[in-house]
């Protein structure tokens, strides 16, 4: 069987989460910082550790079959690859930002102005769509200092907390795209069965992350109200307790409405609520 290759970031913001995701998929490999390639001992897969800038093209050209990389890098390199799975980490927004004291009001105020960025392709496309001609200045790092140095009127960069903009006297002006880490695949991938197996494992890890396992006790009289609040994978399990009029209910709750659900369950008569993380959900 042909061994698949997956490219992930060697070091940087996406490395740790990419390694964690693959390990949670049950893949066994060494994560030596010094090596560029690491074989997986229990799946026909090799892991290539690369700079994130190189991952989209490696996947497009078939040097790697799969890759984990930020959507911003995929768009910027304008590669032709398959988007296989959004991964929910490395989330950020690419924004145009301007100095706090600037009086830019609308996008058209950027006409004829200079914008520094490490993402000229994404910015160029956005400006074109909005019929604006600006002078795009390509800078490979520390874009945020360029207005202060008089090198540009605005910047276009990745923002997550907004702290970097703030500490450089800049304010967000326009959101251009949001991004997260994505699993991408080569367009002519051969080993479809293996890819599907890997995607199924990744999806089971992602589903588990979005949910909590909840066990609670409730008097039988209050059971219908409690059940009504619960989704479960199919439906909640109800287990008898030594105390005759009481039962234990086992279920999973989506992380996003967790606190809301817990307070409603309490109001409906749930007691002794125990919440546990889930490792995997295989449907
Ligand atoms: O060495 P290599 O080339 O592989 O890595 P890199 O240094 O080019 O990239 P890295 O590790 O910084 O980022 C990898 C990916 O993480 C990016 O391509 C994005 O998809 C994603 N990501 C998520 C971010 C951020 N959040 C982020 N905050 N990438 C960069 N930043 C930087 C941003 O450039 C700015 O300087 O953080 C600063 C802003 O952060 P806040 O929190 O102050 O707003
Ligand atoms: Zn990079």
Image: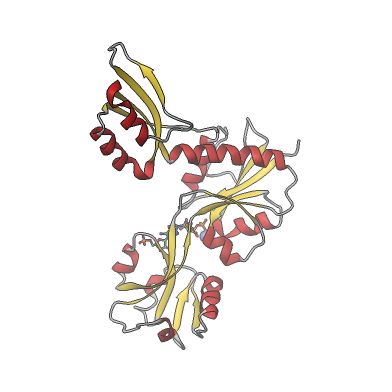
Image position of 119 with respect to 5: above or below: below
Q: Is residue 56 visible?
A: yes
Q: How many marks?
A: 0
Asked whether 113 or 255 is in front, the reply is 255
Q: Residue 281: horizontal and vertical position, in percent?
A: 50, 33
Asked whether 100 or 83 is in front, the reply is 83
Image position of 91 with respect to 169: above or below: above
Name the quadrant where ligand 1 sits: bottom left
Asked whether 204 or 111 is in front, the reply is 204
Q: Quadrant of the C terminus?
A: top right
**Residue 69: quarter of image:** bottom right
Which residue is found at the position 30% from the left and 11% from the top? Answer: 242
Which residue is found at the position 60% from the left and 41% from the top? Answer: 199
**Residue 22: quarter of image:** top right
Q: Is residue 31 visible?
A: no
Q: Residue 145: horizontal and vertical position, in percent?
A: 37, 73
Q: Residue 273: horizontal and vertical position, in percent?
A: 29, 28
Asked whether 260 or 105 is in front, the reply is 260
Image position of 184 with respect to 26: above or below: below
Which residue is found at the position 75% from the left and 39% from the top? Answer: 2
Q: Quadrant of the N terminus?
A: top right
**Residue 110: quarter of image:** bottom left
Q: Residue 184: horizontal and vertical position, in percent?
A: 61, 52
Which residue is found at the position 37% from the left and 45% from the top? Answer: 256
Q: Is residue 253 left or right of residue 57?
A: left
């Amino acid at each position: 069987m042909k061994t698949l290759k997956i490219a992930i970031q060697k070091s940087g913001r996406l490395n740790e989460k990419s390694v964690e995701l693959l390990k949670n998929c049950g893949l066994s490999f060494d994560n030596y910082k010094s090596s560029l390639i690491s074989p997986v001992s229990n799946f026909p897969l090799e892991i290539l550790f690369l700079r994130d800038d190189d991952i989209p093209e490696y996947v497009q050209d078939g040097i790697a079959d799969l890759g984990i990389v930020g959507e911003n890098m995929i768009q910027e390199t304008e590669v032709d690859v398959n988007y296989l799975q959004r991964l929910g980490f490395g989330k950020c927004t690419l924004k145009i930002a301007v100095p706090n004291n600037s009086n830019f009001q609308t996008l058209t105020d950027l006409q004829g102005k200079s914008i520094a960025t490490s993402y000229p392709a994404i910015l160029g496309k956005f400006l074109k769509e909005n019929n604006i001609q600006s002078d795009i200045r390509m800078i490979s790092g520390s874009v945020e200092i360029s207005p202060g140095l008089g090198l540009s009127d605005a910047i276009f960069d990745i923002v997550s907390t907004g702290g970097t903009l703030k500490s450089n006297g800049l304010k967000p002006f326009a959101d251009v795209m949001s991004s997260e880490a994505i699993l991408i695949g080569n367009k002519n991938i051969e080993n479809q069965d293996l890819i599907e197996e890997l995607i199924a494992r990744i999806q089971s890890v992602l589903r588990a992350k979005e949910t909590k396992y909840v066990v609670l006790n409730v008097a039988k009289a209050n059971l219908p109200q409690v059940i009504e609040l619960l989704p479960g994978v199919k439906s909640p399990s109800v287990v008898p307790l030594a105390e005759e009029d009481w039962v234990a209910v086992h279920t999973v709750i989506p992380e996003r409405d967790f606190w809301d659900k817990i307070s409603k369950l309490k109001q409906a008569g749930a007691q002794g609520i125990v919440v546990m993380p889930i490792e995997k959900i295989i449907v």
